[in-house]
């Protein structure tokens, strides 16, 4: 009688799943926090972009974002003085400016310093930036 040794009983716990959960948790917490100050800001301020003065309604409100004047997302003053409502385009622009001012290394090619370039991915970029932004 042959004893078949069992091999391959992988004792490796899929740590990726655990990591996923941590990431998901962190993301949920961040989303919740963001939801909090966003709601606050929308209560305090009129639904108008602080740059281009575009106005918003419930229909397109998701395109109106909360910008932190000092770029510190943890600095959420109850009076809202660190917040500014900006549309996705202007918000993207604002951070672009900040990046260029801070880094200056990756200069935009052929930038005339003019108006915003309206690419179909602009809002996606803004959303990604917001996700990564500290
Ligand atoms: Zn705007
Ligand atoms: Zn911002």
Image (cartoon, grey):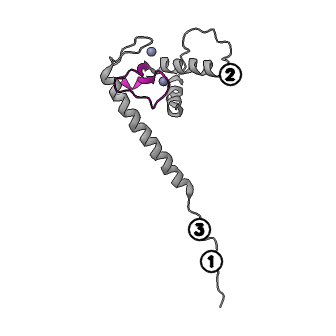
81 versus 127 height, above or below = above
From this view, report whether residue 32 is shown above or below residue 105: below
Q: Nearer the viewer, mark 2 or mark 3?
A: 2
How many other residues sit within 10 Å of disc 1, few (<14), some (14-19) or many (≥20)? few
Magenta stretch containing residue 122, yes or no? no
Which label number is shown at residue 106? 2
Determine whether the residue tagged by mark 1 lies in a helix, strand or loop. Answer: loop
Depth check: give the residue in front, 10 or 102: 102
SS assignment at label 2:
loop
Quarter occupied by residue 46: top left
Task: State the extent of the magenta-drawn residues as a range.
Answer: 61-86
Q: Secondary structure at mark 3?
A: loop
Disc 3 and disc 1: Cα gap in Å?
12 Å
Q: Which mark is residue 6?
A: 1
Residue at 40%, 28% in the rendered image: 76
Q: Quadrant of ligand 1?
A: top left
- In percent of width and height, residue 80 lies at 36, 23
* Disc nearer the start of the sequence (2/3): 3
Q: Residue at x 42, y 41 (%)?
A: 29
Any part of residue 106 in sight:
yes
Location of residue 113 in the rendering, given as x and y in whole percent from the top left corner: 60, 9
Mark 2–mark 1 distance (CA, rounded to whole Å): 56 Å
Give the label on residue 90, or none.
Answer: none
CA–CA distance in space, label 2 to label 3? 46 Å
- Of 2 and 39, the residue lying toward us: 39
Q: Are marks 2 and 3 in contact (CB under 8 Å)?
A: no
Residue on which the image places disc 3: 11
- Say left or right for 84 vs 131: left
């Amino acid at each position: 009688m042959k004893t078949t040794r069992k091999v391959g009983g992988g004792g490796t716990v899929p740590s990726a799943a655990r990591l996923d959960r941590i990431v998901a948790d962190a993301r949920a917490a961040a989303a919740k926090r963001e939801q909090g100050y966003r709601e606050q800001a929308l209560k305090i301020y009129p639904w108008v972009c602080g740059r281009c003065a575009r106005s918003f309604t419930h229909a397109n409100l998701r395109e109106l974002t909360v910008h932190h004047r000092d770029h510190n997302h943890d600095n959420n003053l109850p009076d809202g003085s660190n917040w500014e409502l900006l549309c996705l385009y202007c918000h993207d622009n604002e951070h672009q400016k900040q990046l260029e001012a801070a880094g200056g290394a990756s200069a935009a090619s052929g930038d005339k310093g003019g108006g915003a370039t309206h690419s179909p991915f602009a809002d996606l970029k803004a959303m990604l930036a917001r996700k990564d932004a500290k």
